[in-house]
Image (cartoon, rainbow, N blue to C red):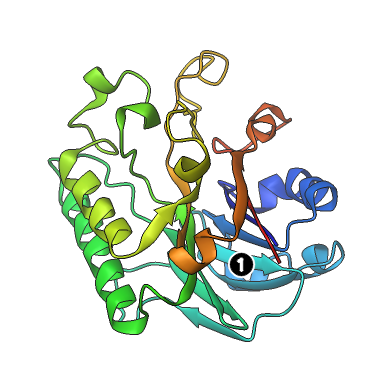
Amino acid sequence: MKMATYNVNGLRARMPLLTGWLKEELPDVVCLQETKVTDDLFPVAELAAVGYECAFIGEKSFNGVAILSRVKPDEVKYGFAFSDPTDGPRFIRARFGDLWVLNTYIPQGQDVHKEQFQYKLKWLERFQEEVEKTYTAKDHLIWVGDLNVALTDKDVHSPEKMIGNVGFHPDEQAALLKCQNWGFMDLFRQFHPEEVAYTFWDYRVPNGFKRNIGWRLDYIYATSMVAQTAVRCEVATTMRTAEKPSDHAPVIAMFKE
């Protein structure tokens, strides 16, 4: 099985790039974040034409998550079990047999001194509570998405300058690690324990990609039973060099059947 996660930063703007990549890579499941499209305008027909079923929840101009798959999911759930009006379309999950795929777009947080940062911490706490109440670490789970947290010095440029800023703050790192320590393994680190690698390069930084001024914000996590079947996990950096790219690159993991 080939699994990918990709913050497209506007699905409709990225459709030529995405569909070309799907036809070339042929992933079995692709989780998208920041689709930024209302459900009635989601490009179901265009994605079906290249062989993908679609489960999605979105809104205009912001947020939005989707799971594309070559076979139809057995079950799809949207959001938290106990939703909040401020949640937004940030969480979708799909079941394929005994495997659950959880796709999240965690709030960015804006500024550590603003209420949006506290909301981010609360969101991570709620996600952990949802996982603890719904699953066990022995279940077959893959958790992916743009998690908007760089965990270590290897995951962000200039860590000595960035520490304490949103995206690289000890409070959000601790919150994400608490989720991870429940029973998830970071598949990229499983195969690349010491590599400095990024998945996001801000458009606003002049020549940010060429200068490799980036962050590793996009993850593929798996519980132990699934992680044991993983054979590789890579960042598809070439997607960031394409015409009209997202500011993120996809992360791809391969698993034994």
Along the viewing direction, whichever of 140 and 125 lies nearer the viewer: 140
Q: Which residue is mark 1?
A: 67
In the rendered image of this protein, does residue 134 appear above or below residue 111? below
Seen from the viewer's position, the closer of residues 67 and 254 is: 254
Quadrant occupied by the C terminus: bottom right
Residue type at mark 1 is: Ile
Residue 131: x percent and y percent?
33, 74
Quadrant for the N terminus, please: bottom right
Residue displayed at 33% across by 53% down:
107
Q: Is residue 26 left or right of residue 147?
A: right
Q: How many marks?
A: 1
Residue depicted at 51% across the width and 59% down the height? 227
Q: Residue at x 43, y 29 (%)?
A: 194
Front residue of this view, candidates 13 and 74: 74
> Most extreme residue toward the left, as rendered?
113
The crowd level at tag 1 (other Cα within 10 Å; few <14, some 14-19, many 20+) is: many
User: Quick check: 74 above or below 9?
Assistant: below
Q: Is residue 131 left or right of residue 61?
A: left
- The image quarter in which residue 105 lies: bottom left
Q: In terms of image quadrants, where is residue 47?
A: bottom right
Can you see residue 250?
no
- Secondary-structure class at tag 1: strand
Outermost residue, front side? 228
Is 210 located above or below residue 240 in the figure?
above
Q: Taking 167 as reference, is 241 left or right? A: right
Residue 181 in the image, given as x and y percentages of width and height: 28, 58
User: Would residue 53 appear left or right of 250 to someone viewing this image?
Assistant: right
Q: Is residue 173 visible?
A: yes
In the image, residue 88 lies at what x, y percent? 38, 67
| Whole-percent x, y for residue 147 in the image | 39, 50
